[in-house]
Amino acid sequence: MAVMWSVIFYTVAAVLAFYFILLRPVLKNQKDQRKAVRALQIGDEVVTVGGLIGEVRDIIQPADGPTEIVLEIAPGVRVRAVTDAISRRLTTLEDVPESTPPQEATQPSA
């Protein structure tokens, strides 16, 4: 009877270890990637899974089928890609709030 419980315990422990060590980080990365793709805007610079770097020129959301993105990879050269092909976002045109400039150290008068 004790052997049966130890087998069940080690099986459950192995499944939990598999989930927390291997599966959970992959699922988190996929969720973050989907979130980043949904936040894409025209003017963002992205990298595709194939290694192409381009600027988002248009986002097409058809009634049926996957969302498409028109990328400009060179001046006048535009390609269409599905959102699953976007690996990551490099830059965005969103305004970044300017930080306050560092104050210059005043030198004590001698």
Image (cartoon, rainbow, N blue to C red):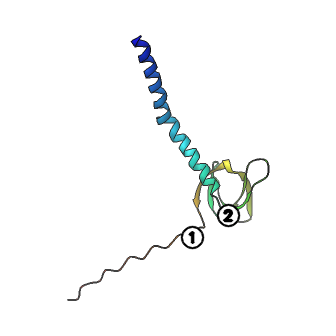
Q: Residues within 10 Å of mark 1 (few under 14, many from 20)?
A: few
The quadrant in which residue 105 appears is bottom left
**Image coordinates for residue 75, horizontal then vertical, percent:** 71, 66
Residue 16, percent across and down? 47, 30
Farthest residue to the left: give it.
110
- Could you tell me which secondary element the residue under label 1 belongs to? loop
Callout 1 amino acid:
Asp
| Residue 28 picture location, percent across and down | 54, 44
- The residue at 58%/46% (across/down) is 31
> Residue 75 — which label?
none
Q: With 28 as the anchor, is 82 left or right in this view?
A: right
Q: Considering depth in this image, is 18 or 13 the residue closer to the camera?
A: 13
Q: Residue furthest right?
A: 63
Tell me the amino acid under the disc marked 2.
Ile
Which residue is pictured at 42% across the width and 77% down the height? 101
With 90 as the anchor, is 1 left or right in this view? left
Quadrant (top left/top right/bottom left/bottom right) for the C terminus? bottom left
Mark 2 = which residue?
42
- Element assignment for label 2: loop
